[in-house]
Amino acid sequence: MPEGQLEKVRKRRGPYAGKRDAFIASASREINRKGVKGMTFADVAAPLAVVPTAVVYYFSNKEALAEACFLNGIGRFRDMAARSAELPEATARLSDLVRRHLETRAAIRAGDAPEIAAFSDILALGSQVVNEAYGEMFRQTRVLLDGGSHTSRKDLNGRTMLMVGQLTWLPTWLPNWRRKDFARIADRMSDVLERGLAASDSSIDDLQLPDLDFSVVEPRTPRAQFLTAATVLINQEGYHGMSVERISARLNVTKGAFYHHHDSKGDLVEACFERTFGVMWRAIDAAEAAGGSGLQIVARLLDVLVGLQLSDMPLLRTSALSTVPETLRAQLMMGLRRITIRLASILCDGIADGSIRSVDTTITAQMLTAAINGANELDLWRRDAGSDEARQDYVRAILRGFVA
């Protein structure tokens, strides 16, 4: 963490608050590197040139420190949403919120603001206080997006989940861009969020999403079931919270059965990512093989992958990349990048055939990945998340736009 940033954090308020804030800033950075379970007091203390016991003076345990980090990040999210909510129109509020998040990311990149702990580990922490604060943040964002139309509460919940997912996904792909381009990214993202992908509403109304057939992208083999169980645990607990014992208990098999398939925990995580990438590639191939316009291909692809996320065979949340060992991370990031590039190519095909309006395909492909990644949290906000209606509402919001 840049020394200048730490000094700004220390001087923000009094000496007690300054030290506490400095620990939160350092811990947020470690959570983003290693996850809640992988963070240690020694890692937090080292950049501040203090001993680990100094952290204990302010936070009795690691969970209390992680709780403070998440509450800090949620508070900053809510502050941005509150400022955006002052604008009269829903579209203006949406674009203003996106702009504020990109400005915050630019300040973090420049060392002028402390990092925000990634929300992907909130469920792993299991803090009621944090969960309630996150719920309030969600409801505040929902009000901001409500344009007073006839959108149902269930549909609005899905759109809000999409919006939160887009904003929290930013740290995954912004490192590929220059800081001076962040304003451009904000404009392009807002355009897609507001107006969607489809060249016309009629093309969406006529769009028939097919019955789901998951066997096309993943047959139910014993190995697939094993990897799915591990995927569910990693999604819930992060890399460091997943254990061989818990996977074995979930499947009612011995630890020996685990080691028959995988040499180590790292080997298993790598296999889970390979399974996820394999499923996504097979879904891309199947969607294209069925033919149709670029919009139909995108819709078909989103439908099956969002459906998987809401089923008992979810994909590994790519936010878990931030918690896997750094030796694996670069290789896995390359796998994700290849898929995103392919999504951009499909978008280009849709623009060429006139079914998708003119959008920035590089940025929009990242937004599609974020939508797929965040879909398995829809069940937190829609009781009918596993229904065809919920899935199709979610997909159509991507195609039509959030505030249409």
Image (tube, grey):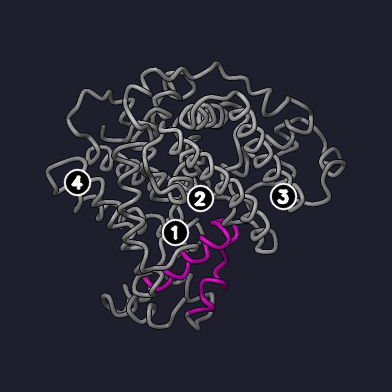
Q: On the image, numbered disc 3 is attached to which residue?
A: 270
Give yes or no for residue 283 being in the magenta stretch: no
Q: Is the C-beta separation of discs 1 and 2 under 8 Å?
A: yes
Residue drawn at (70%, 63%), measured in percent from left and top?
Answer: 327
Callout 3 touching callout 1 (CB < 8 Å):
no
Reading the chain from its start, which is encountered first: label 2 or label 3? Answer: 2
For the residue pair 185 and 112, the one nearer the viewer reads as 185
User: What is the secondary structure assignment of the residue under circle 2?
Assistant: helix
> According to the image, label 2 marks what residue?
121
User: Residue 211 falls in which quadrant of the image?
Assistant: top right
Residue bearing the label numbered 4: 92
Q: CA distance from mark 3 to mark 1?
A: 24 Å
* CA separation in Å, label 4 and label 2: 31 Å
- Secondary structure, mark 4, is helix
Chain-order first, disc 4 or disc 1: 4
| Mark earlier in primary sequence (4, 3) | 4
Cα–Cα gap, marks 2 and 3: 19 Å
- Residue 345 spot, x, y in % from top left: 53, 44
Q: Residue under circle 1?
A: 117
Of marks 3 and 1, which one's residue comes earlier in the chain? 1
Marks 4/1: CA distance? 27 Å
Give how far across and how far down residue 143 sits, in percent.
22, 38
Given the image, on which type of amino acid does mark 1 rest? Ala
> Which mark's residue is nearer the viewer, 4 or 1?
4
Amino acid type at mark 4 = Ala
> In the image, residue 296 lies at what x, y percent?
48, 26
Majority SS type along the magenta span: helix
Residue closest to the eye, 130 or 268? 268
